[in-house]
Amino acid sequence: MVDRLEKGKAKFNELYGEGKADGLVEMQTGLAQDLARYGIEFNFGDIYSRPGLTLAQREMATIAALVALGGLEPQLQGHTRGAINAGLSATEILETVIHTVQYAGFPRALNAIRVVTDALIAYGVEIPPALGPDRD
C-alpha cells in the first residue's frame, strides 16, 4: 500500500507541484484525511500512473468527464490548473469544454466554461479570442 501512496504522491506532485499531495491530505480533518489519501493512491497511484496516455491527455479526458458530470466546479478548477501544468494550452482546454456541449448539454458546458475561463484568468493565462460566426 505504501508503494501505491508514494507512486500517487509522486504523480500528483508532478502535476500540481512539490508537496501538494501532502497538502491535500493535511487540509482535511480526521477521517477525511483517509479519503484524500485513497484518492491519491487510486486516482494518481493507479490510474494517472498507467502508461498509454500523457498527463496532458489524461487532464483533457478528466476535464471532459467533469463537465459532463456537472456540479464539480472545485474539481474542474483544480484540473484546469493541472491541465496547464501538464502542457495544455488555453485553447485546448477551452475547446475540450466546447466539445462536450454535444454530450453534456449547454447548461453544463456554459457553467464549465465560466469556471475554466475564470481559472485560466486567475492563473495568468491569456484567453484566446472568439472565432466568431465568420470562422471559416
Image (spheres, rainbow, N blue to C red):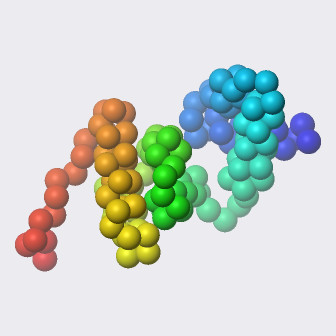
Q: Report the quarter where the N terminus lies.
A: top right
93 relative position to 12: left or right: left
Name the residue located 65 percent from the left edge and 39 percent from the top edge: 12
Q: Report the quarter where the C terminus lies.
A: bottom left
8 relative position to 116: left or right: right
Q: Which of 73 and 91 is in front in this view?
A: 73
* Outermost left residue: 134
The answer, for residue 60, to whether it is visible in the render is no
What x and y, as percent, mark residue 56? 52, 54
Name the residue located 36 percent from the left edge and 33 percent from the top edge: 123
What x and y, as percent, mark residue 29? 73, 23
Q: Quarter-wise, where is residue 22 in the image?
A: top right
Q: Nearer the viewer, residue 63 or 91?
A: 63
Name the residue located 17 percent from the left edge and 53 percent from the top edge: 129
What x and y, as percent, mark residue 79? 51, 46
Above-or-below relation of 96 to 39: below
11 relative position to 75: left or right: right
Name the residue located 56 percent from the left edge and 35 percent from the top edge: 16
